[in-house]
Image (tube, helix red, strand yellow):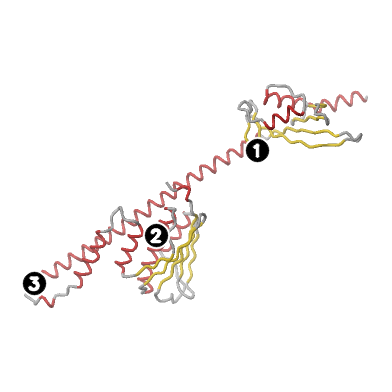
Amino acid sequence: MKRFLNHSVKEAFDHLPSGVCFFNKNGTLTLCNYQMYWVFFALTGTDLQSKPEFDELLESRAEEIQRDGDVFLSGDGRAWQFAQEEITVQDGNVYTQVTASDVTELYNRQKELEEDNKKLAEDAQRIRRLSANIISLIREEEILNMKMRVHDDIGRSVIATRQFLQQGRPMEELDVAPWKNAVRLLKHENELSEEQDAVDQLMNAAYSLGIKVSIDGSFPEDDAAKDVFISVIRECMTNAVRHAGAKELYVRLTWDHITATVSITNSGAAPAKEIVEGGGLTSLRILVKKSDGTMELKTVPRFQLTVSVPVRLEEKK
């Protein structure tokens, strides 16, 4: 009966799904089930006989041993992870128990997750590049619209001057202010070329609107973050002139290798009531969100817009 019981225990031990073996204090293999024999042979091509052989497998970086960190890969596509601990039996003898667990499903899911994360990162990079291109197109469209307005003003000034001369009126009565304004705007518009820096274009636009932009700090080196800030400043500049009658825009820029922040106020009148975000501010919020950033709007004690975006210097080409 006892022999039958021992046989049943050994049979159950041999058919465990995990590999299990025991070494005595001298490193000699005293007990090992079929699964552990199979795993060791599948990884090394040799039979397991001693603890030093097992330690050599764990420390091996040989090309014929397929491993990914602490996970070992057998030829049948399965992944295995080893664990060992010392146990003391009733007679006081100490043994080292080694187990080999089948972690194939977990390993495959981890690799799928890594691949998904890689694709998400690539998609995010494409979105940032697309956002930067959109910002550039919007900027070019704004410049083109302003040029069209300037040329329209000149056209009207030409017609008005011709009528003035045809009527034979004295030249000192001619209002030349529209001419001077149109020529001033046209001069600065002609300076807006593709080679110009976005900051120069921003300053030219401020000059055209009649507002002074004071910048404390420097723009981040990350082009995507810089483009977002240019769009934010441009929108605040337009709103400050249109809604607050501001003559100056105050811009504070701070950034490090993780986050860039721009905070904007103006010299105009404080908002009389809570600001309801319209098309411009809503578009800014969408742009900031696409850049994984945050946007905070305050109206008390005066208008203040703060935008923070992540800095990704490693992606700069």
Q: Mark 2 vs mark 3: which is more N-terminal?
A: 3
- For label 1, the residue is 106
Where does the N terminus fall, quadrant-wise?
Answer: top right
Residues at circles 3 and 1 in contact by the CB criterion of under 8 Å: no
The correct choice, above or below, for 29 with respect to 146 in the image is above
Q: Mark 3 vs mark 1: which is more N-terminal?
A: 1
How far, Cα to Cα, is label 2 from label 3? 45 Å
The correct choice, above or below, for 316 with respect to 249 in the image is above
Q: Which amino acid does label 2 sit on?
A: Ile
Q: Residue furthest right?
A: 1
User: Disc 3 on helix, strand or loop?
Assistant: helix
Q: What residue type is labelled 1?
A: Leu
Quarter location, residue 14 = top right
How far, Cα to Cα, is label 3 from label 1? 88 Å
Question: Residue at the spot x=47%, y=65% of the render?
Answer: 306
Quarter location, residue 95 = top right
Rendering coords of residue 5 (x, y %): 89, 26
How far, Cα to Cα, is label 1 from label 2? 46 Å
Rendering coords of residue 126 (x, y %): 44, 46
* Badge 1 density bin: few <14, some 14–19, many ≥20, Cα 10 Å: few
Residues at circles 2 and 3 in contact by the CB criterion of under 8 Å: no
Residue 230, disc: 2
Residue 165, disc: 3
**Front residue of 220 and 174:** 220
Q: Is residue 186 left or right of residue 39?
A: left
